[in-house]
Amino acid sequence: MTDLTQHAAVQSADADAANMSSQIVDRRVSFSYAEDFEAIWTPLAPEFSCAANSVSLLMPYIEPYFVKSVRRFVPQLDDQLAETSHAYLKQELQHHLAHREFNDQMADHYRGVSRLERMMRNTINWLHTKRSPKFNLAFAASSETIAYSAARWAAERRTELFGQADPVAASMFLWHLGEEVEHKSAAFDVFKAVDGSKLRYVTSMILSMILLMFFVACGTTLMLWHERRLFNPVAHVRLWRWAIPFAFEVLTNLVVSATGNHHPTDFADPSFYELWLREYDHETGTLPLWDAAATAPSHSISELR
């Protein structure tokens, strides 16, 4: 367990120990895609586009589920935690809207996406209606740890993953990941205040991982098939090269989060997201646009509208 704890606390070279979750900011960012927008928006890593697109398909269903699961318990919280929870819910709703718009692009490119989305919707509806409110809350808390882990993993590989990427799509995903880091503690704190059952947390964690892997595998397979890369050995080598460190990052953080008196603020955050999100302009609602050449944000999203 010592090695797992050490890995969870150690930051990559471009990170510092600052925790972004101390303030959750309500950002109203919109993303407009060109008429000739390509579903493979990372030409140097097309398999990553397929995997990321598959994650995006799930967001319009899972994000509202998190919102309903947390909002149900807000009246039971103290004023400070309730305020933080409201800020978290606003961010989640913004993610829902942004991914809904992005997914409309996917439906135009890939036959079968609508059927997969129905499976996702039905599964999430089943969770919401058939599982207990406390289980749903635990599911939201453990899923946020997975999302936070994905953000750390992506930050360390942003040059490889987002090199020459479509700037609007890249900005949308990086903005979402940055806010996952920012609100990493929100659902966890509500769960601890309301329930805190380790068994419920671990059970929901396992189910969350299974559902994520299943739906991402389905979506990635579907898109690789349409792109005629499903039987390309290079595609599978790349996917496994990303999947193994991703699984290690996620599983390590999940194990640590389920043991002892761990709190999400014990994790060290990538500084990249914090520095980028600082540039958000509240008056105009613009965010720096991802600059693939510099692997850093520049200009603003509004310039492409």
Image: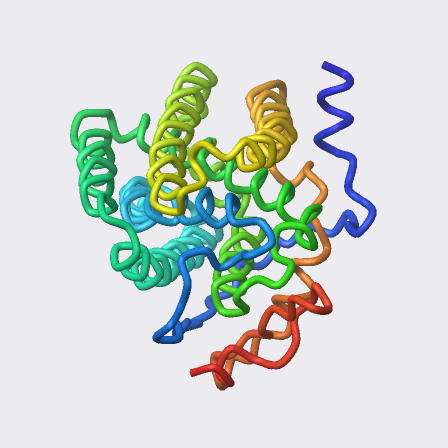
The C terminus appears in which quarter of the rendering?
bottom left
User: Does 4 sit above or below residue 27?
Assistant: above
Q: In the visual, does 59 lie left or right of 245?
A: left
Going 41% across and 41% down the picture, which residue do you hit? 224
The N terminus appears in which quarter of the rendering?
top right
Q: In the visual, does 127 lie left or right of 301?
A: left
**Percent x, y of residue 157:** 68, 47
Q: Along the line of sight, which residue is nearer the eye, 126 or 210?
A: 210
**Percent x, y of residue 166:** 52, 66
Q: Along the line of sight, which residue is nearer the eye, 57 or 165?
A: 165
User: Does 179 sit above or below residue 9?
Assistant: below
**Percent x, y of residue 17:** 77, 47
Going 44% across and 24% down the picture, which residue do you hit? 205
**Percent x, y of residue 181:** 58, 49
Q: In the visual, does 41 lie left or right of 200?
A: right
Going 37% across and 22% down the picture, which residue do you hit? 207
- The answer to whether residue 74 is seen in the rendering is no
- The answer to whether residue 29 is seen in the rendering is yes
User: Does 7 sit above or below residue 170?
Assistant: above
